[in-house]
Image (cartoon, coloured by chain):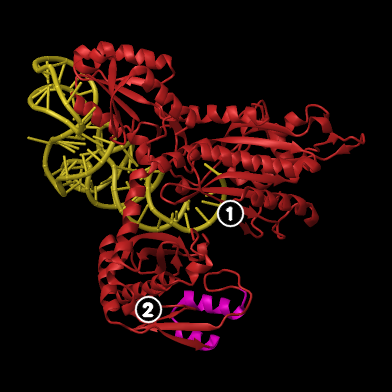
Chain colours: A red, B yellow
Amino acid sequence: MADGKSESYLDSDLYRIRHSTAHVMAQAVTEMFDPDEAKVAIGPPIAEGFYYDFDLPRTLTPEDLESIEKRMREILAGNFEFKREVLSADEARELFADQPYKIELIDGLDAGGLDEYGEPIDEKPEISIYTQDTFTDLCRGPHVANTGKVNPDAIKLLNVAGAYWRGDETRPMLQRIYGTAWESADDLEQYLWKLEEAKKRDHRRVGKDLDLYSVNEAVGPGLILWHPKGGMVRKLTEDFCRDEHEKGGYDFVYSPHIGKASLWETSGHLDWYQEAMYSPLDIEGQQYYLKPMNCPFHVQIFNTRTRSYRDLPLRFAEWGTVYRYERSGVLHGLLRVRGFTQDDAHLFCRPDQMPEEIDRVLNFSLNILRAFGFENFQAYLSTRNPEKAAGDPEDWEAPTEALRQSLEREGVPYVVDEGEAVFYGPKIDIKVSDALGREWQLSTIQFDFILPERFNLAYVGEDGEEHRPYMIHRALLGSMERFMGVLIEHHAGAFPVWLAPVQAVLIPIADRHAEYAREVAATMKEAGVRVEVDDRGERMNAKIRDAQMQKVPYMLVIGDREIEAGAVSVRLRSEEDLGSMQIDPLIERIQEEIIARS
RNA sequence: GCCGACGUAGCUCAACGGCAGAGCAACCGCUUUGUAAGCGGUAGGUUAUGGGUUCGAUUCCCAUCGUCGGCUCCA
């Protein structure tokens, strides 16, 4: 129900509660203005609440939200029935004569093919209205029986934001009020707790607190500066993945950041991707573009020699940094940036190798994601969009079927996004659920019918003839930036030991213990543990507090007793006290955790 | 890009037409400490940038840049 559209949700009491609460909110809002000043648009339930869009004579303030919420509770207390009526299109037009957005919806419903939210539907719908108290809205329902069925202690208005009418930036900008509604006050409280928790885990905040990365105004928006600690997490991530790729039969390639305009013309990027590409550089009269993707380079490497069917499959992997223009308003911490590094690879294979290649890459992807602590996956299979699709429909069948069967074999839950594929081929996207149950898209596995043709890729078959290879793009973590962001939020900055930038802090209690601490540190470093000595003139309590807030997995306290015993006193960031431990068993324990990646 | 909110010390925030402040962090002392903040001191600012209004602007107005919440899009 992440998209708020699952069957069971559409059918639930919660859905009705939210839908009805949206209507009550619309009543409260329209009451604030003269009837001819306040225009209402649409107000559907969404995954964890509802919204309603308004066209109002002035901007709403947070104070307005409070008074709207107060008025909503009064309306709810009125116990007004939600009365449904079915109208003809003309009757509806008359009723909503001074509501232009409703008129547009009615015209759409009357024409058929779309519901009131602009979603395609098969039949021409009945036009119905719902009335509670003084407010009547065009609506297909369903609703609760009366306003008394909505718990006034389980609703909350969250924020106001701008939203285009019908999501179309050429249409008017409306004011959207987001709210949430639950069955019980406890449910509401739990939801608000989750929002708070999400705020605490926000990678932008954690990134600052743990000194992982920054975005700098002098450098530019959407461009990430990795600090030493964040850089270490990223390096460890990359090292692990590179090793896995090597074991997995990938070859490593490297390609430049810019390429000639003619390359991007051949690849087609200048035709269909130019709006996301930066303006060209002029070098000796030739135009060069910053790369938005790595594919054309890998394709060129493929093409540097005649390939035999014996050479295939070829798997070219690169941590390729690409630059894409993103509109300033969409940039978001590490999750949406303008320069990012994809863990990219391109697979070239014979048609007969394709199903196995898909299996391998899907399995590979899931295993890598599991290594980072993700357990729950949701896959999306995007199929051919007849409106915009390269190649013949039958070309799509085998790859689409191969993708589907791989998902079945892996047992990954998946949904089919009918017609959602990019024009060059079908694809699988994999989303992971994090510790708070939020979904993040990471892996993508995409077929490509276009590039092999445009670059005239070929291999010589057993028959001595030239054949066109299949080409698959895939990124597993997606982008290093985005993945780091997701990882930070998933672990709330408390990275598993193998990824922790600092795995242990040695805390000498007094100055006289510092020398021993440095000796222990040297021993541990020797054993490959990332360790620091906190020899500041602070009290032990302060040092523990700082290490705790930095989410360091091991805090090793050293005082007279430990020196005497040749040991350290071990505290975990979980606040568990392991007591006094000898150095060797401690190192062993840490190393085991690193290997187990826990 | 668009709508709205917001930019004050490294960080979190005060002051809101009349001398720009606190806590934390940094630095310097004192303290030598037993599992989440010891005490004292010092330093730190063209109040994002540029213009305007005013006797006087951090405060009011305009523009630009940036951040945040959304819309749209996506790795």
Residue B64: x %, y % from top left: 41, 43
Q: Tell which subunit mark 2 falls on.
A: A
Q: Main secondary structure of the magenta part?
A: helix
Residue A242: x %, y % from top left: 58, 28
The numbered disc on residue A413 is 1
Neighbour tally class for label 1: few under 14, some 14-19, many 20 plus, Cα within 10 Å: few
The answer to whether one can see residue A510 in this image is yes
With respect to residue A451, does A238 lie above or below? above
Neighbour tally class for label 2: few under 14, some 14-19, many 20 plus, Cα within 10 Å: few
| Residue at point 62%, 74% (across, down) | A113
Whether callout 2 and callout 1 share a subunit is answered yes
- Provide the residue designation for mark 2: A36
Where disc 1 sits, the SS reads: loop
In the displayed structure, does residue A285 sit left or right of residue A522? right
**Magenta span contains residue A93:** yes
Q: Amino acid at mark 1?
A: Pro
Q: Earlier in the sequence, mark 2 or mark 1?
A: 2
In the rendered image, the quadrant that contains the C terminus of chain A is top left
In front of the other: A520 or A214: A520
Q: Tell which subunit mark 1 falls on.
A: A
Residue A185: x %, y % from top left: 29, 65
Where disc 2 sits, the SS reads: loop
| Residue at point 80%, 37% (across, down) | A457
C-alpha span from label 2 to label 1 = 49 Å
Q: Amino acid at mark 2?
A: Asp
| Residue at point 64%, 57% (across, down) | A420
The answer to whether one can see residue A294 in this image is no
